[in-house]
Image (cartoon, rainbow, N blue to C red):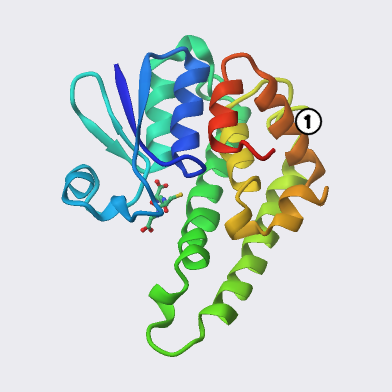
Amino acid sequence: MYIVFGDKGSGAFSAEAALAEAGAPYELRLVSLEKDEQHTPEFLALNPTGKMPALRLPNGEIVTESLAIMLTVADRYPDAKLLPPVGTDERTRAYRWLSFMATEIYPMVEISDYAERFTGKGDQSGALRATVRERIRDRVLVVEREIKGPWFLGSELSLVDIYAAMFSRWRGSLGTEWVTGGRIARLDAISKSLSERPRLTEVWKRHFWKD
Ligand SMILES: N[C@@H](CCC(=O)N[C@@H](CS)C(=O)NCC(=O)O)C(=O)O
């Protein structure tokens, strides 16, 4: 049994969705962001950076970093084809865009969610949050424009769709008007398709019940 540690509506979605799509046995252990439970000694023992998601493998090994978690699931369930075959251009594109989202989008979410960590005393946090939201929107638009359709890479679903859909649903960092306003129509279509997949419907509802 795999165990995902994280909150609803957090990066735990990407871990859960990869496991669910692979048909892996897992359970979700809730860690509340609102209650700051990512900073409890119990969670810090799993991930000293205080970030979710964390995944416990059936053998007890802990994996953190959302991208590492998804790649681990893809490796362990090759029949689920969560990535295109090794050595293909599609695989290379998957690496490129997964890396882009993990390094160019996800770190900015912390700045948006916890701007005061970066501004310190004084009240620059509102201005910083507004600036970083624009950068996040710019980069989500870059992803939007790269979608081949119907899925990101073309005819087959991959981890790129799971990851991209997650960032496109986060009202806190992207803004409600972007999540619901039809400005990222191709990402919206991918989200809809994911939410309708039998293996993912419950996961989707748990994390994005408003959509
Ligand atoms: N690089 C990490 C980032 C994870 C991350 O920022 N998670 C957020 C929730 S979506 C978090 O745990 N935030 C709590 C905090 O920063 O205190 C990953 O890819 O897993």
Counting every numbered tag in the picture gives 1
Residue at the top extreme? Answer: 79
- Location of residue 17 in the rendering, given as x and y in whole percent from the top left corner: 51, 27
| 64 shown above or below 190 | below
Residue 137 occupies quadrant: bottom right
- Location of residue 111 in the rendering, given as x and y in whole percent from the top left corner: 48, 67
Identified at 28% across, 35% down, the residue is 63
Residue 134 occupies quadrant: bottom right
The kind of residue tagged 1 is: Gly
Location of the N terminus by quadrant is top left
Identified at 49% across, 19% down, the residue is 20
- Location of residue 88 in the rendering, given as x and y in whole percent from the top left corner: 58, 25
Residue 196 occupies quadrant: top right
Question: Left or right of 197: which side holds 126?
Answer: left
Location of the C terminus by quadrant is top right
| 102 shown above or below 199 | below
Mark 1 Cβ inside 8 Å of ligand 1: no
Q: Can residue 38 be seen in this view?
A: yes
| 145 shown above or below 93 | below
Q: Can residue 50 be seen in this view?
A: no
Density class for disc 1 (Cα within 10 Å; few <14, some 14-19, many ≥20) is: some
Residue matched to label 1: 149
Residue at the front extreme? Answer: 35
Question: Left or right of 3: which side holds 61?
Answer: left
Question: Left or right of 13: which side holds 45?
Answer: left
Secondary structure of residue under mark 1? loop
Identified at 53% across, 18% down, the residue is 21
- Location of residue 142 in the rendering, given as x and y in whole percent from the top left corner: 71, 53
